[in-house]
């Protein structure tokens, strides 16, 4: 028996088979395409990816394949009352890995550790480079004493061969450090292309590597082969200790302890007490690279115990504060020559350094009266001048300070390396200012390290 299909049934079967074939064909093509062409945006770990949409041929780097950023230090800077800036110095150890917008958090903390202000932001992270994260003008009505910094989670790392264009910084000149500091510099673009979106961060360090001041500026574009002048400014002075000498110093502090140093008859004796206070201030201004010695003189001079030429500035300050007038005080005369001689011996001893600048600062409150020589009334001054000449011939710069009004200024100018190296202090109240002036003159001073960080993020 033969089963015959009507034409309508035959047509329905043919159409159904055709549709099934098309569906199977499209499914096969889709499977082959999906299987052979995985991408980095499909939310799956496929192809040669080592994680979901990361690693392998994907630009996004898997979190486990990158090293953590290293925060070198964080500093808090007071701009003015209630207004602060913060800076973090960070190192990216990852090679050929950048982060376009790494989120971060600064916390400003009071002395008891309480967070008084928080500032969030994002920053570009260059590959294999040290960079800074700066946040200015953070306001708070409480007083922060420190700051902390952290990245808010793991940055999204991308594999990239982007290298920031080379820009050349030159002529870093810092002026007006003690009023309104200004750092002037130039930046040159040696490339054959223009460079856009340049951020410059200037950091000034003290002699111990601590960041003292920071400022930031922005340049929208530096044209090819162009040189641009740039200035950074600060509203507050940079402390004197933020500057150090070109060479380290070997200093002899020679201090008068004759009987006249207690002529005011007070207890503690004056003007000796103020003299010691001013000399201690000077010792505080020396840097950790300097050495100092303390010599005091009356009828004769002596080097203070534990203060023969040393880097231990605490011992130096202690020795200054230990100076006293030998009793009976009215029998203690002024042997300036022996003070200069003992100071010179310190600066030419085996402890002295060949590469250091030699400075002797002699303070006296009267006319030299010792040593004596029969038939030569002015012998104490003549001998002191001879001893001072030997010191100067040995390469020592000699400053003299005359305390009071009853002294021979011309004699003290002759003892000094030059007349301008003699300073008159009419009263003990003037001594700290005198020592400050000597500190500015005793060597060519320069700013400590000035570092300028350049950031040029790539275009996305």
Image (spheres, grey):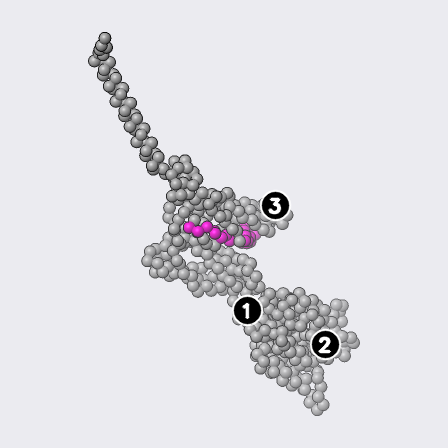
Tally the marks. 3
Kindly report the distance in space between the C-alpha atoms of the residues bearing marks 2 and 3: 54 Å
Q: CA distance from mark 1 to mark 2?
A: 33 Å
| Disc on res. 52 | none
Magenta region: which residues? 73-96
Labels 1, 2: front one: 1
Q: Give the number of the disc on residue 245.
A: 1
On the image, the x and y values in percent for residue 150 come to: 53, 47
Q: First in sequence: mark 1 or mark 2? A: 1
> From where the camera sits, is residue 384 visible?
yes
Q: Nearer the viewer, residue 92 or 219?
A: 92
Name above or below for residue 163 compared with residue 50. below
Secondary structure, magenta segment, majority class: strand
> Would residue 210 be found to the left or right of residue 162 on screen?
right
Callout 1 crowding tier (Cα within 10 Å): few <14, some 14–19, many ≥20: many
Q: Secondary structure at mark 2?
A: loop
Instruction: Identify the residue at image location x=51%, y=62%.
Output: 449
Is 91 colored magenta in this rendering? yes
Is 102 left, or right, of 377 in this rendering? left
| The N terminus, quarter of image | top left
Q: Residues within 10 Å of mark 3 (few under 14, many from 20)?
A: few
Q: Which residue is mark 2?
A: 258
Residue at the image position 25 percent from the left and 22 percent from the top: 18
Front-lying residue, 13 or 401: 13
- Looking at the rendered structure, the secondary structure element under dot 3 is loop
Chain-order first, disc 1 or disc 3:
3
Query: Residue 46: image x %, image y %?
Result: 39, 37
Position of 22 with respect to 112 (left or right) is left
Q: Earlier in the sequence, mark 2 or mark 3?
A: 3
Q: Nearer the viewer, mark 2 or mark 3?
A: 3
Image quadrant in which you'd find residue 426: bottom right
Residue at numbered disc 3: 114
């Amino acid at each position: 028996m033969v089963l015959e299909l009507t034409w309508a049934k035959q047509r329905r079967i043919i159409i159904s088979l055709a549709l099934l074939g098309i569906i199977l064909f499209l499914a096969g093509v889709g499977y082959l395409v999906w299987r052979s062409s995985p991408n980095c945006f499909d939310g799956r770990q496929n192809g040669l990816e080592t994680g979901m949409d990361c690693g392998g041929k994907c630009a996004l780097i898997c979190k486990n394949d990158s090293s953590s950023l290293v925060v070198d230090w964080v500093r808090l800077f007071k701009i003015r009352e209630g207004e602060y800036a913060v800076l973090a110095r960070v190192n990216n150890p990852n090679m050929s890995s950048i982060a376009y917008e790494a989120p971060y958090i600064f916390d400003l903390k009071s002395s008891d550790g309480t967070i008084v202000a928080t500032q969030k932001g994002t920053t570009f992270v260059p590959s294999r480079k040290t960079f800074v994260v700066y946040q200015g003008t953070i306001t708070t009505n409480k007083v922060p004493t420190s700051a902390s910094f952290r990245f808010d989670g793991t940055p999204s790392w991308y594999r990239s061969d982007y290298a920031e264009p080379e820009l050349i910084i030159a002529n870093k000149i810092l002026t007006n450090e003690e009023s309104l500091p200004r750092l002037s510099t130039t930046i040159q673009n040696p490339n054959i292309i223009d460079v856009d979106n340049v951020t410059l961060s200037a950091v000034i360090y003290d002699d111990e590597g601590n960041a003292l001041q920071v400022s930031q500026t922005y340049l929208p574009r530096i044209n090819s082969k162009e040189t641009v002048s740039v200035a950074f400014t600060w509203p507050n002075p940079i402390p004197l200790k933020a500057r150090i000498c070109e060479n380290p110093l070997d200093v002899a502090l020679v201090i008068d302890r004759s009987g006249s140093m207690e002529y005011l008859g007070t207890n503690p004796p004056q003007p000796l007490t103020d003299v010691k206070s001013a000399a201690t201030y000077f010792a505080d201004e020396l840097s950790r690279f300097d050495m100092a010695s303390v010599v005091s003189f009356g009828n004769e001079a002596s080097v203070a115990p534990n203060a023969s030429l040393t880097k231990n500035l605490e011992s130096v300050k202690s020795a200054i504060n230990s100076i006293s007038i030998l009793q009976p005080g009215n029998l203690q005369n002024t042997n300036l020559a022996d003070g200069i001689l003992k100071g010179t011996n310190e600066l030419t001893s085996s402890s002295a350094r060949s590469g250091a600048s030699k400075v002797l600062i002699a303070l006296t409150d009267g006319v030299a009266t010792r040593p004596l020589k029969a038939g030569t009334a002015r012998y104490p001054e003549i001998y002191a001048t001879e001893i001072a000449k030997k010191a100067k011939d040995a390469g020592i710069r000699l400053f003299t300070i005359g305390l009071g009004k009853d002294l021979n200024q011309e004699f003290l100018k002759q003892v000094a390396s030059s007349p301008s190296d003699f300073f008159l202090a009419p009263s003990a109240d003037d001594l700290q200012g005198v020592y400050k002036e000597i500190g500015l003159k005793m060597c060519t001073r320069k700013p400590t390290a000035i570092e300028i960080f350049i950031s040029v993020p790539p275009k996305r």
